[in-house]
C-alpha cells in the first residue's frame, strides 16, 4: 500500500484562514524549489535559524513534518506535495496584492479613473489632463460626471474615485479634502463689445444685461450674495445651468458674464472675451479635491491626486 497522503489538499480559502503570513508561504515555496534550508535563507535574505523556526511553525500548522532529511537532502512529504499547488497560488495572490498596494505604474496601467467635477472644471483642466495622459499614462482612461446629491454615496461605494468640488460639498465624516485653489470672480464680455472696452464700472454692471449661471450646485450663490450686499440690481437676460452653457452665447451677444477667473482665462485664450475685475467686493471661490477614507491609501488615486495638485499649481485654472 502506498504511504502517500490520500486526503485532498485543503482549499485555498482554508489555507488563507489559518493566519499563514506571506513570509511562511514564501519559505514553503522556496523549500519546495531548493530542498535546502541554507539556499532558502539566501534567496529570501533571511538567516538559517529564522527559516528553521518558520518551518517549525508550518509543521505545527499542518501537523506534519513537511520536509524530511534524506540522503538526497530535504525531501517533501506527501502532504507537502499536496500543499504545493494551493500554497503556491496563495503566495502568488498575496504577493500580487502586496505589490499592487505599494506600486502604481502610470506608464503601464490601464486603470479607469472616475472623476466627478464641477462643470466649469472641464474648460481649463481637461486639456491639461489629456496632455498628461498622452505623455505619461497612455493606457489610463478617464470617466467624468457632474456633481449631484448622490456623489458622496457613490464615492463611499467606490463608484466615483475623486470629486473636484467646492469646499463645503463633502464635509461629512469619512471624507478627506485637499485645497486645490482659491480664485476670484471676474466679469467677461465678448472681445468686441461695443460699450465695454477698457474697464467695467458699477454703472456698466447695472446697465447691461447679464448672462447668469444658476446658483444650484455651481457656487454662484456666493456671487449672488455679494451682488445683494453691494446693492446692485442685476438684470438677467439669459440664464444657464453651468458655465458650459455660456459658450454658444457669449461670442454673439452683449451680455456680461460673471465667472471664476480660471474659466474666464480659458475663454480669453480662445479669443472669445475680455476679462475685467469685478467693480464690487466678492468672496473667493475655494475648490477642493475630495475622496473617501476607504480609498485614502490607494496608490493609483494617490498618484492622480498628486497630478491634479501639480496641474493646479501650474495654472490657477479650475473654475466654479
Image (spheres, rainbow, N blue to C red):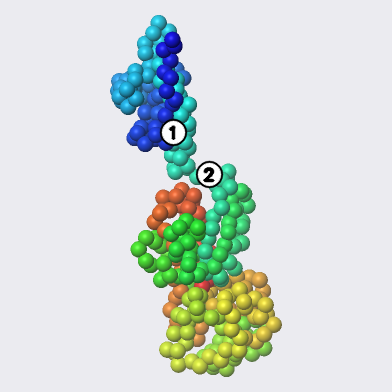
Picture quadrant where residue 207 is located: bottom right
Q: CA distance from mark 1 to mark 2?
A: 29 Å
Residue 311 placement, left or right of 131 = left
Q: Residues within 10 Å of mark 2 (few under 14, many from 20)?
A: few
User: Which circle marks residue 219 in the picture?
Assistant: none
User: Which circle marks residue 105 in the picture?
Assistant: 2
Picture quadrant where residue 71 is located: top left
Picture quadrant where residue 41 is located: top left
Q: Residues within 10 Å of mark 1 (few under 14, many from 20)?
A: some
Furthest-front residue in this view: 1
Q: Look at the picture and state if 233 lies above or below 154.
A: below
Residue 68 placement, left or right of 257 = left
| Place of residue 219 in the rendered image (x, y in percent of width and height, measured from the top left) | 48, 76
Residue drawn at (42%, 89%) of the image: 229
Residue drawn at (44%, 11%) of the image: 2
Foreground residue among 289 and 263: 289
User: Which circle marks residue 12 in the picture?
Assistant: 1
Foreground residue among 181 and 92: 92
Foreground residue among 258 and 77: 77
| Place of residue 298 in the rendered image (x, y in percent of width and height, measured from the top left) | 44, 50
Q: Quadrant of the N terminus?
A: top left
Q: Look at the picture and state if 119 lies above or below 206.
A: above
In front: label 1 or label 2 = 1
Q: What is the secondary structure assignment of the residue under circle 2?
A: loop
Residue 209 placement, left or right of 16 = right
Q: How many marks?
A: 2
| Place of residue 181 in the rendered image (x, y in percent of width and height, measured from the top left) | 46, 67
Amino acid at each position: 500500500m502506498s504511504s502517500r497522503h490520500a486526503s485532498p489538499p485543503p482549499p485555498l480559502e482554508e489555507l488563507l484562514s489559518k493566519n499563514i503570513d506571506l513570509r511562511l508561504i514564501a519559505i514553503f515555496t522556496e523549500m519546495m524549489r531548493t530542498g535546502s534550508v541554507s539556499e532558502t535563507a539566501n534567496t529570501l535574505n533571511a538567516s538559517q535559524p529564522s527559516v528553521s523556526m518558520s518551518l517549525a511553525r508550518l509543521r505545527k500548522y499542518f501537523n506534519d513534518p513537511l520536509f524530511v532529511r534524506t540522503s538526497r537532502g530535504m525531501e517533501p512529504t506527501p502532504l507537502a506535495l499536496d500543499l504545493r499547488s494551493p500554497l503556491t497560488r496563495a503566495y502568488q495572490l498575496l504577493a500580487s496584492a502586496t505589490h499592487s498596494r505599494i506600486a502604481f505604474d502610470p506608464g503601464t496601467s490601464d486603470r479607469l479613473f472616475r472623476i466627478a467635477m464641477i462643470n466649469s472644471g472641464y474648460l481649463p483642466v481637461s486639456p491639461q489632463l489629456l496632455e498628461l495622459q498622452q505623455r505619461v499614462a497612455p493606457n489610463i482612461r478617464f470617466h467624468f460626471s457632474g456633481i449631484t446629491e448622490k456623489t458622496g454615496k457613490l464615492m463611499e461605494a467606490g463608484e466615483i474615485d475623486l470629486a473636484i468640488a467646492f469646499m463645503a460639498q463633502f464635509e461629512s465624516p469619512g471624507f478627506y479634502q485637499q485645497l486645490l485653489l482659491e480664485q476670484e470672480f471676474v466679469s467677461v464680455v465678448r472681445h468686441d463689445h461695443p460699450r465695454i472696452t477698457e474697464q467695467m464700472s458699477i454703472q456698466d454692471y447695472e446697465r447691461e444685461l447679464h448672462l447668469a449661471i444658476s446658483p444650484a450646485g455651481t457656487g454662484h450663490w456666493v456671487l449672488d450674495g455679494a451682488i445683494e450686499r453691494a446693492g446692485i440690481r442685476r438684470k438677467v437676460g439669459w440664464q444657464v445651468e453651468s458655465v458650459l452653457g455660456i459658450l454658444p452665447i457669449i461670442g454673439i451677444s452683449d451680455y456680461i458674464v460673471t465667472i471664476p477667473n480660471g474659466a474666464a482665462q480659458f475663454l480669453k485664450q480662445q479669443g472669445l472675451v475680455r476679462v475685467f475685475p469685478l467693480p464690487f467686493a466678492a468672496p473667493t471661490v475655494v475648490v477642493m479635491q475630495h475622496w473617501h477614507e476607504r480609498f485614502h491609501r490607494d496608490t493609483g488615486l494617490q498618484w492622480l491626486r498628486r497630478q491634479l495638485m501639480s496641474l493646479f499649481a501650474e495654472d490657477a485654472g479650475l473654475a466654479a
